[in-house]
Amino acid sequence: MHSGDAQPLQPNAVIAVDVVLFKVRHSEHIDEAWQVLLVQREDAAFAGKRSLPGVLVRAEETFDAAARRALHTKAGLDAAGWYLEQLGTFSAPDRDTRGRVVSVAHVALQRTDELTLVPGGGIMRAEWAPVRSVFGEELAFDHDAMLGAAVQRVQSKLRYSWLAFQVLPETFTLPQLRAVYAAILDASLLRLNTSNLKKTFAPLLASGALVPVGERASTTGAGRPGDLYRFQGPVAGTWERELPWQEGSSVNE
């Protein structure tokens, strides 16, 4: 068939984008430190179930732009400069009771010092929830499966990439860095002492990606304040090899 004879395509599905946004915050309970953004819609059709922030993709819009718009319109977050990556496509015919909707899920991690949630139109509540407490909860659509896939992606990438630095402040101590790994992978990593921690990150220090600032962190408690470091590598960078530790448990267990 010549291209001039082709009939225009008729839409047979609507495309959506949903975003799994994670953060790691300081918490006395390490199981509550790793958190995910959830929203609760006003529409009674969702029966009070929480969901990930998402939008339908506009005709002139890229998936990336739609993901950033979802965070802005649903939770008031300016994600213009954030690193987002596609997680996967969720296309079960019955995933949305309103019709055939295919969702292209995205995942992101962000530091928490400047994130203020403002529920958008049609959103009753936007809130952070501990990742481990959300497992077992029935989220709207297939968002529980989407969250599970995002958790596996992040836990896997944390072992060989520089993903942890996306949730840390501009300058940080090695114990703060250790806390990120403990929150996402395994709480027992909190027992890793500073000496072994420095050995673990020796390749990054040698490469110049992890740089001592030459200052100590301010502290009001007892004990010697830790040395401050700054990460200067690319956000999407990877290690040459996996980290030497193995987690003893996963979120899904």
Image: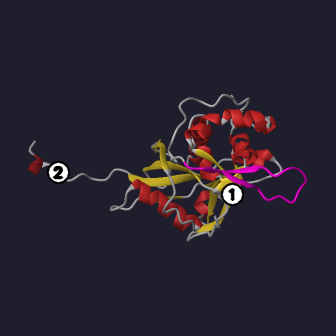
User: Which residue does the image show at 77% across and 35% down from the upper left?
Assistant: 195
Neighbour tally class for label 1: few under 14, some 14-19, many 20 plus, Cα within 10 Å: some
Regarding residue 84, the answer to whether it shows in the image is yes
| Residue 7, disc | 2
Which one is in front, 46 or 176? 176
User: Which residue does the image show at 37% across and 60% down from the upper left?
Assistant: 61
Q: Residue 45's x, y, as percent?
A: 58, 60
Q: Quadrant of the C terminus?
A: top right
Question: Relative to 130, is 58 on the left or the right?
Answer: left
Q: Mark 2 or mark 1, which is nearer the start of the sequence? A: 2
* Amino acid type, callout 2: Gln
| Residue 128, disc | 1
**C-alpha distance separating marks 1 and 2:** 47 Å
Which one is in front, 175 or 253? 175
Residue 64: which quarter of the image? bottom left
Q: Nearer the viewer, mark 1 or mark 2?
A: 1
Q: Which residues are magenta?
A: 213-232
Neighbour tally class for label 2: few under 14, some 14-19, many 20 plus, Cα within 10 Å: few
User: Which residue does the image show at 64% across and 65% down from the upper left?
Assistant: 114
* Amino acid type, callout 1: Trp
